[in-house]
Amino acid sequence: MLRRDFMSVLAGAVIAGPRLAIAQAQSKVYRVGTLLPGPPLAEKSPLGVILLKKLEQHDYTLGKNLAFEARGAGGQTGKLGEIVRAMKAGTRSTSL
């Protein structure tokens, strides 16, 4: 009986093994967005570099598991609400 139990566990591991490996290979991509009333915060700007370095210290790598989106209102603060809604929806604001 012990041999039959061992074979059942072994067969289950062989069947489940590839599925677990496939599930681990797909990683989630996190989105980080910045919104300023003036021009957008570029990833190459001093503050953008600091932000991305700090995120990288916590294992969020741009292009791997992190997407960075910077937007700015260009001085039109009345458009901030519209831009926020567009960011939440994952689209670009058409008026800016």
Image (cartoon, rainbow, N blue to C red):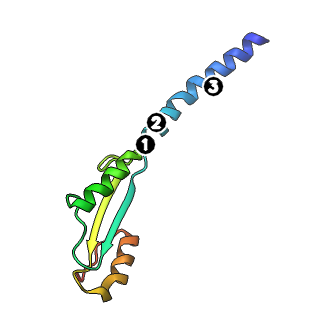
Task: Classify 51 as above or below 25.
Answer: below
Q: Please give the name of the residue rendered at 33% of the width and 82% of the height, measured from the top-left corner.
A: 80
Label 2 – label 3 distance at C-alpha: 16 Å
Provide the residue designation for mark 3.
12
Q: Are marks 1 and 2 in contact (CB under 8 Å)?
A: yes
Q: Quadrant of residue 9?
A: top right
Amino acid type, callout 1: Gln
Instruction: Where is residue 31? Give x, y as percent.
Output: 38, 59
Q: Amino acid at mark 2?
A: Ile
Occupied quadrant, residue 71: bottom left
Mark 2 crowdedness (10 Å alpha carbons): few <14, some 14-19, many ≥20: few
Residue farthest along the right direction in this orientation: 1
Say whether residue 28 is left or right of residue 9: left
Task: Give the x, y percent position of residue 42.
Answer: 22, 63
CA separation, marks 1 and 2?
7 Å
Q: Nearer the viewer, mark 2 or mark 3?
A: 2
Mark positioned earlier in the residue sequence (2 or 3): 3
